[in-house]
Image: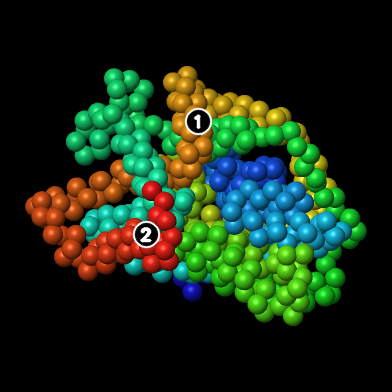
Amino acid sequence: METFGLLLDGLALAVSGTNLLYALIGVTLGTAVGVLPGIGPALTCALLLPVTYKLNDPTGSLIMFAGIYYGGMYGGSTTSILLNTPGESSSMISALEGNKMAKAGRGGPALATAAIGSFVAGTIATIALTFVATWVADIAVTFGPEDYFALMILAFTTVTSMLGSSVLKGVVALMFGWILGSTGIDELSGQARITFGFPAMQDGIDIVIVAVGLFAVGETLFMAARHRAVNETIETVRGSLWMSKDDWKRSWKPWLRGTLFGFPIGALPAGGAEIPTFLSYATEKKLSKNPEEFGHGAIEGVAGPEAANNAAAAGVLVPLLTLGLPTSSTAAIILAAFQQFGLQPGPTLFLTNADLVWSLIASLYVANVMLLVLNLPMVGVWVRLLSIPRPWLYAGILVFATIGCYAASGSVFDLILLWMLGLVGFVMQRFDFPVAPVIIGLILGPLAEIHFRRALSINQGDPAVFLASPLSATLLVLSVLALVGPIIWRIVMKKPVTA
């Protein structure tokens, strides 16, 4: 009952005039940018991160950002279905079946089942987030510094092994982020580190600059470099946008099953949206009475994976809000949004900033309703956005990212750093280095170092403290398994190990 009361208090704040406007702006901007070809939720959030930087109200800013997050997820489904261009790997299945439906003149029902399924899954997953988050936060409050250090090591190993094609490349990206995060004045000793004599670097490197540089600038340069003058076919939405009775009958069970796949897997430290979407697709194909339709435009193949994708989006907020652990690229950008206001997600956030946390969670319900109302009636507007020429799109993103970051900091040094990191991001994309571990290393690396030093200080320098705590020892063992498990699996399956 206490959780329900806190949620009602948060809802009262979320639906207040200003915050409701922030939510509407967020979902509109998120959908408008997310629907652009090749732009996934992570890039959408990174590109729009500077928009929230100058807002004086952290609550309103994070509510807007939550709307951007959900809007980017919704917008990606439109691109996948009508243009067959998924902005992220978890949208590949929606593109596979949804685009075939659009070519057959059933783009309307495909968009409808994606939008309604996303609403159903997002709402159910947000309810689960509401009650699971408090339980996890209550447990996490009892953690000692050695437990937090081990938990962050687990986050490092799972992210580096799950994101990207190579564990080694993931570790290199993570260490690069850790070095960036260590720049500036050391919190415990007060000494300047890795500043290279630049006074501007003594305050550390702004996380907004790193996120926008690596994701928005770097990824856009990479997409522009791969661009070829080819004609992309945008499938027009013909006929009714609404679903028939048979479409409803074939969709509602996949929506629920997709939610059951998406939220629990998304909430795991090694979660994400790719695994649940593929599991949902495989399940629907196996349970379908018309398996021959799969690969040719089966509506279940859109309904289930889209539900799983959006449920996982709510699921990743569980470790993010309660433990401060991002488990995906988009979650890392959301963590950056908290950091720009000096807020560190984790169990203490529920105690020190309860109003902010609960209004943020409540705003997710509001954003879901807004997106359902916005998406289908405005599908014509979103289709027009798809026709923007790619060179104009890439140039616009680069200009917007540059102006946004300069407006946020007003520093020419930060502007130079932005483009330097953008070039680094381009090189990382070119050679298949995952970008998300850089952001995670930047944020969590210094925190892991602080907890490591505190644990040793409390225990008079004895490193055995990390094995003396049962929780810490268990997490470290899981970290080793997460790191070597994929390598052992490839050896057992007699596949070459990527290094």
Count neighbours of disc 2 (C-alpha within 10 A) and say few if under 14, some if 14 to 19, many if 20 or more.
Answer: many
Label annotation for residue 105: none
Element class at badge 2: helix
Q: Is residue 246 above or below residue 472?
A: below
Q: Position of residue 28 (x, y in %)?
A: 69, 46
Q: Name the residue rendered at 33%, 20% in the picture.
A: 198
Q: Name the residue rendered at 39%, 31% in the picture.
A: 205
Q: Nearer the viewer, residue 316 or 283?
A: 283
Q: Name the residue rendered at 80%, 71% in the picture.
A: 247
Please give left or right for residue 31 compared with residue 169 in the image: right
The answer to whether any part of residue 46 appears in the image is yes
Residue carrying label 1: 422
Query: Disc 1 vs disc 2: which is toward the camera?
Result: 2
Residue carrying label 2: 487
Q: Position of residue 499 (x, y in %)?
A: 38, 48
Of mark 1 and mark 2, the one earlier in the sequence is 1
Q: Position of residue 57 (x, y in %)?
A: 52, 41
Q: Position of residue 184 (x, y in %)?
A: 30, 30
Q: Name the residue rendered at 19%, 47% in the picture.
A: 453
Q: Nearer the viewer, residue 310 or 17?
A: 310
Element class at badge 1: helix
Q: CA distance from mark 1 to mark 2?
A: 31 Å
